[in-house]
Image: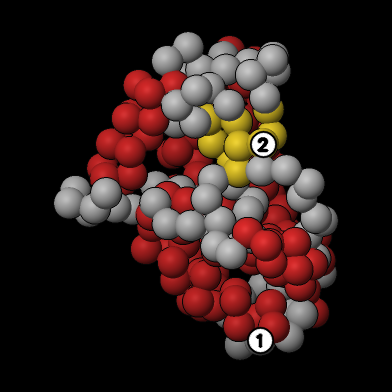
């Protein structure tokens, strides 16, 4: 039976709307900013499982099939599945190839590649993830060959970056205990399977 890509697109858009709505509620209560909210994680995993099922049945929702907006929403749903490493890694393989032919948004694929590396504790390729360092400064985490960073970003339709520092010490917000926050984050990456316990 032929795939109803219009319905596929609507399913993806509906999931993204629900994601945004839950995020807004949790932000209003403050729960969103106290680690990874269990309520937010539940929504992320539910959507990722549904999207995985749709992709297995019909193929990936590329721009030519569902339009750019729905293709972007699909990538955002994948990016939000941060406690399901296997799914994100699987989608990286699929989308990197599709991006070469302009079938998925390149900038979101770059974010996926980097996010996986970020959680695995490896250097980024495109510098799309930032984190608080031990001094409470928000900066782009380590990247490969920094001198060619902006050239790589341009290839993936990302704007150039002038500095790896996002928020200096005189910025508005810094974690009260950056070291403790980092330790909790690393423990989480072990718990969900991004890193093995013996990895640095």
Q: Position of residue 3 (x, y in %)?
A: 66, 81
Taking the image as shown, residue 167 lies to the left or right of residue 188, namely right
Please name whichever residue, 89 or 149, is drawn nearer the observer in this view of the structure. Answer: 149
Q: What's the residue at 50%, 23% (across, down)?
A: 135
Q: What's the residue at 49%, 31% (across, down)?
A: 133
Taking the image as shown, residue 31 lies to the left or right of residue 17, namely left
Q: What's the residue at 37%, 63% (across, down)?
A: 86
For marks 2 and 1 on the same chain, the one whose residue lies earlier in the sequence: 1
Q: Position of residue 156 (x, y in %)?
A: 74, 69
* Residue hosting label 1: 2
Taking the image as shown, residue 64 lies to the left or right of residue 31, namely right
* Residue hosting label 2: 165
In the image, residue 76 sits, relative to residue 147, either above or below, namely: above
Q: Counting other residues with Cα less than 10 Å from the Cα at mark 1, is it few (<14), some (14-19), or many (20 or more)?
A: few
Taking the image as shown, residue 123 lies to the left or right of residue 129, namely left
Q: Counting other residues with Cα less than 10 Å from the Cα at mark 2, is it few (<14), some (14-19), or many (20 or more)?
A: some
Q: Which of marks 2 and 1 is in front?
A: 2
In the image, residue 1 sits, relative to residue 16, either above or below, namely: below
Q: Quadrant of residue 144?
A: bottom right
Q: What's the residue at 64%, 19% (across, down)?
A: 169
**Residue 161 can be seen in this image:** yes
Q: Residue 12 carries which label?
A: none
**Image quarter (top left, top right, bottom left or bottom right) of the N terminus:** bottom right
Q: Distance between the residues labelled 2 and 1?
A: 49 Å
Q: Which residue lies furthest to the front in this view?
A: 147
Q: In which quarter of the image is residue 41?
A: top left
In the image, residue 170 sits, relative to residue 100, either above or below, namely: above
Q: SS of the residue at dot 2?
A: strand
**Residue 114 can be seen in this image:** no
Q: SS of the residue at dot 1?
A: loop
């Amino acid at each position: 039976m032929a795939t109803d890509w219009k319905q596929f697109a609507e399913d993806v858009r509906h999931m993204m709307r629900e994601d945004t709505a839950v995020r807004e509620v949790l932000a209003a209560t403050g729960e969103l900013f106290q680690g990874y909210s269990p309520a937010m994680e539940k929504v992320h995993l539910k959507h990722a499982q549904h999207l995985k099922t749709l992709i297995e049945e019909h193929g990936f929702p590329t721009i030519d099939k569902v339009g750019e907006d729905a293709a972007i929403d699909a990538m955002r749903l994948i990016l939000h599945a941060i406690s399901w490493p296997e799914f994100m890694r699987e989608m990286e393989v699929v989308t990197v190839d599709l991006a070469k032919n302009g079938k998925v948004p390149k900038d979101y694929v770059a974010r996926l590649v980097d996010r996986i590396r970020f959680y695995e504790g490896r250097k980024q390729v495109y510098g799309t993830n930032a984190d608080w360092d031990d001094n409470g400064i928000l900066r782009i985490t380590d990247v490969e060959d920094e001198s060619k960073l902006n050239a790589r970003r341009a290839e993936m339709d990302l704007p150039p970056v002038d500095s790896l520092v996002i928020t200096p010490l005189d910025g508005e917000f810094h974690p009260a205990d950056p070291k403790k926050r980092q330790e909790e984050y690393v423990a989480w990456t072990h718990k969900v399977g991004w890193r093995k316990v013996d990895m640095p």
